[in-house]
């Protein structure tokens, strides 16, 4: 099996995680980042994909700034395409690894109150988690300032709160999100200090959640912006490192499933 990691946006953990997952399954893994690719010479996304496809790669892991780019590629190439994050849209393997981490601690997902907090507007992690957690019967709450919560997002199956104390009341899981300033085209938060005061997770705000509530963050973390270091590093509450560990396991499962399906297809062809 040959796996190509095609990353048009920066990544540390997701790219490394897919690379490790592929190698642990015995695949040949090739990493391509846009700075080394012919996209810089004007090639279109579809031409890049067609070129890689002609080399007969089996699995194409794609991260792109445009929502829907992996979906478009999946229609154009023979390789199985895995979305490693597309714009503001989705980050499916992140939601899978989050669900696995929660399940390991809580024994299941149904009935859990999960609060997703912060910059919902720019978060593909939030969107994938809303879909997955709602499908598994969680009570999904979104907490953030009105400027960072898109109008109508309740229709995806979540309730919206603008006050951390109300939104966190009785939560089993508190999932913090990074303030994605690189995607903001306007000043959506007055200042980092004020943001932390109202929406940063510290001991006082966490006290409103259940005493055994898990603290999660997809990374990279902005300490002192959306989360206090004391909480992020508290081994009794934080499962942030475990999320990274589960990322490799989940991606191995995804790659293995797709590789077997391709093998099966070939055998039956
Ligand atoms: N690493 C996650 C993503 O790529 C979250 C983040 O960047 O804040 O979407």
Image (tube, rainbow, N blue to C red):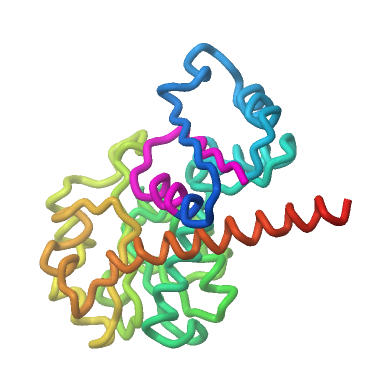
Confirm whether residue 191 shows in the render: yes
Is 160 on the left or on the right of 163, as rendered?
A: right
Residue drawn at the location 37% of the way across and 36% of the way down: 10
Residue drawn at the location 48% of the way across and 63% of the way down: 95
Residue numbers of the magenta segment: 1-20
- Seen as rendered, the residue at the extreme front is 26
267 vs 167: above or below? above
> In which quadrant of the rendered view does residue 232 lie?
bottom left
Confirm whether residue 64 shows in the render: no
- Seen as rendered, the residue at the extreme right is 269
207 vs 215: above or below? below
Say which of 103 and 1 sits in front: 1
- Give residue 26's position: percent from left, percent from top: 53, 52
> In which quadrant of the rendered view does residue 214 lie?
bottom left
Numbered disc total: 0
- Give residue 16's position: percent from left, percent from top: 39, 47
Is 263 on the left or on the right of 44, as rendered?
A: right
Is 261 on the left or on the right of 124, as rendered?
A: right
Say which of 42 and 22 sits in front: 22
Residue drawn at the location 61% of the way across and 24% of the way down: 48
Say whether residue 52 is magenta: no
Residue drawn at the location 50% of the way across and 70% of the way down: 158
- Give residue 269's position: percent from left, percent from top: 88, 51
Say whether residue 17 is magenta: yes
- Give residue 241's position: percent from left, percent from top: 28, 65
56 vs 205: above or below? above
């Amino acid at each position: 099996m040959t796996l190509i990691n095609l990353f048009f946006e920066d990544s540390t953990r997701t790219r490394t995680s897919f690379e490790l997952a592929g190698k642990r399954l015995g695949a040949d893994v090739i990493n391509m980042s846009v700075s080394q690719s012919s996209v810089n010479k004007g090639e279109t996304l579809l031409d890049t994909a067609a070129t890689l496809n002609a080399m007969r790669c089996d699995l194409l892991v794609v991260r792109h700034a445009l929502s829907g780019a992996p979906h478009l590629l999946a229609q154009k190439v023979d390789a199985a395409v895995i979305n490693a994050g597309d714009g503001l849209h989705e980050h499916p393997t992140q939601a899978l690894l989050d669900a696995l981490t929660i399940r390991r601690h809580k024994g299941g997902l149904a009935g859990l109150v999960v609060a997703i907090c912060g910059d919902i507007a720019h978060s593909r992690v939030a969107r994938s988690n809303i879909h997955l957690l709602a499908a598994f019967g969680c009570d999904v709450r979104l907490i953030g300032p009105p400027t960072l919560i898109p109008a109508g997002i309740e229709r995806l199956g979540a309730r919206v709160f603008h006050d951390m104390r109300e939104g966190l009341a009785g939560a089993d899981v508190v999932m913090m999100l990074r303030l994605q300033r690189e995607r903001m085209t306007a000043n959506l938060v007055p200042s980092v200090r004020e943001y932390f005061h109202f929406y940063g997770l510290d001991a006082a705000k966490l006290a409103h959640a259940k005493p055994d509530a898990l603290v999660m963050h997809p990374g990279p973390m902005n300490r002192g912006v959306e989360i206090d270091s004391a909480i992020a590093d508290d081994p009794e509450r934080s499962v942030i490192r475990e999320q990274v560990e589960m990322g490799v396991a989940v991606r191995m499962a995804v790659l293995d499933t797709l590789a077997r399906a391709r093998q099966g297809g070939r055998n039956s062809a």
